[in-house]
Image (cartoon, coloured by chain):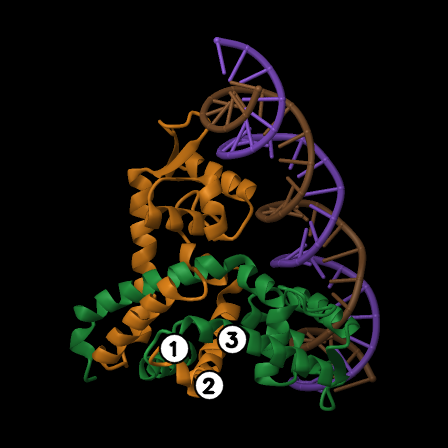
Chain colours: A orange, B green, C brown, D purple
Amino acid sequence: MRYARYSGGVKNEVGHEIADALAILLRRTTRTQLHKQLTEGMGEGVDEQTYPVLSELARTGPRSAADLAPDVGIDRSGVTRRASRLEAAGLIRREADPTDRRAHLLVLTDQGRLAVEELRTRLAAHITTSLSTWPPNEAETFAHHLGRFTSEGPFT
Amino acid sequence: MRYARYSGGVKNEVGHEIADALAILLRRTTRTQLHKQLTEGMGEGVDEQTYPVLSELARTGPRSAADLAPDVGIDRSGVTRRASRLEAAGLIRREADPTDRRAHLLVLTDQGRLAVEELRTRLAAHITTSLSTWPPNEAETFAHHLGRFTSEGPFT
DNA sequence: AGAATAGCGTGCGTAGCGCACGCTTCTGCT
DNA sequence: AGCAGAAGCGTGCGCTACGCACGCTATTCT
């Protein structure tokens, strides 16, 4: 436990610093404001509500709606309904789980995969622009840290 | 423009890296899932909806509901209604703007200030825990970077 | 002074949420 | 082997909160 002795001191400061920044970030993007802006003008079926489902599905591969629900942060029934919209738009399809005939797996269609890539590029472009004044190495370490924070962080 | 030449190369990679991490982070915290968890067991009036209003108000000082609205990401009328709840709980009060008698400024009460501090500490503790395995200097630079990203970033 | 504008709160229609129900399929126990 | 309970899915229902638009008061501009 090499860093344990810092827990009460500097670490707490850092915690507050991150907390404040994160609070602002989340407030600004809460209520899918960012998602709405991001999905503006995308085709049928992609909006601020279906986007998180689509995006999470792309990240993890085919999953059931029930599995997806906690990661999206809404009830299972909500995921089902959003999935129906995405299905109607041809972005995903429901596939029978070969190992369990009750289960419906949600899987991206080619069109869905394309949409996800477009959205990802949009967001990246948005971010890249705002990083244009950063020293590249700092941007890189920040990206690395943010990735670690997200995967190991308190919001897994 | 010292870093301009990187815009198309490494920078784009970094943009994607941040985009992916951020997308996950936002998805996980979308629909106020974090806010709900954070406000669990707080007193009357503080919930996942009123929290952003309260928090933003604490950050910027007394403001009108209309000013607050874009930062919270909802309509002006929504802020008014949430503010009414907070007022009923004694966490904020409406004060007549001395320079304009139409305007109602929202200002935190002492009790409100206390609630905000508690929430801030909760979030910080949450984060600090997950940073316990990080080298302190990396945590510090990450905090610094995140702060800069939030204040200069694409979501201002 | 009078007309247009800005700021606030509220009524209204709408949309999405969570809960619970019914149906099908699977599993574990006797 | 068969039956009871559980698991998984989609959908109906009541509710809440949202955004828009309206009315009212105060302000600004000509």
Q: x%, y% of residue B24?
A: 39, 59
- Which picture quadrant has residue A104? top left
Which mark, residue B125?
A: 3
Q: How crowded is mark 3: few (under 14 residues within 10 Å), some or many (20 or more)?
A: some
Mark 1 and mark 3 lie on one chain; the one further toward the N terminus is 3
Left or right of residue B12: residue B62: right
Q: Mark 3 lies on which chain?
A: B
- Which picture quadrant has residue B97? bottom right
* Real-space CA distance between mark 2 and mark 1, rounded to the nearest whole angstrom: 14 Å
- For this rendering, which residue is in front, B7 or B30? B30
Q: Residues within 10 Å of mark 2 (few under 14, many from 20)?
A: some
Q: What residue type is labelled 2?
A: Glu
Which mark, residue B146?
A: 1
Q: Which chain carries label 2?
A: A
Who's the residue at 25% across and 68% down the image?
B14
Q: x%, y% of residue D9?
A: 50, 32
- For this rendering, which residue is in front, B74 or B36? B36
Q: What residue type is labelled 1?
A: Leu
- Which picture quadrant has residue B60? bottom right
Asked if residue A106 is positioned above or below residue B148 in the image, the reply reads: above
- Residue that label 2 marks: A13
